Image (spheres, rainbow, N blue to C red):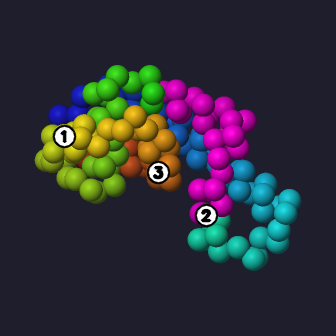
Amino acid sequence: MIPINEDKVEFIISVAREYREGSMAMVSEELSENHAADNYTEHSVANMVESFTSEDHAMNSSYEELKSAIENLNEEERYALVALMWIGRGTYNPDEAEKAMNNARSSDNQHTAEYLMDTPLLPDYLEEGLIQIGK
């Protein structure tokens, strides 16, 4: 069992989608202002997204809202969110939820929010994780 309230996960999914849209808007703005878009590949655009610093995202209110939502979870809920994301992306199957939780506990390094926020498909993985565990 994954010990986190479904409403909290759904809120994080919602904010993560807003955050992802904001990141893509930043890329679009960068492309339109500085360069011809036909010079970019999917790989170079992905590298551009990864190169944005937290200062770049500071103007994006969904960044702060998502980071705060994750950081305000208690320890077990943060582990559960990581485990749920891992289940959703297929690292673990739903029968391995306890193993995923234990690995999330042992992986804790006080950077859970950053780890999750750096996962481009976070909202999709969380949504799939909820489906997989039957919530």
What segment is highlighted magenta in the picture?
46-69
22 horizontally vs 133: left or right: right
Q: What's the mark number on residue 47? A: 2
* Amino acid type of the residue that numbered disc 3 sits on in the rendered structure: Thr
Say which residue label 3 marks.
119
Q: Main secondary structure of the magenta part?
A: helix
Q: Position of residue 6 (x, y in %)?
A: 34, 29
Q: Which corner quadrant of the image does residue 126 belong to?
A: top left
* Amino acid type of the residue that numbered disc 2 sits on in the rendered structure: Asn
79 horizontally vs 99: left or right: right
Say which residue label 1 marks.
102
Mark 2: secondary structure? helix
Is residue 120 highlighted in magenta? no
* Amino acid type of the residue that numbered disc 1 sits on in the rendered structure: Asn
Residue at image point 27% right, 49% down? 87
Mark 2 and mark 3 lie on one chain; the one further toward the N terminus is 2
Q: What's the mark number on residue 74? A: none
The alpha-carbon separation of the residues under discs 1 and 3 comes to: 20 Å
Mark 1 and mark 3 lie on one chain; the one further toward the N terminus is 1
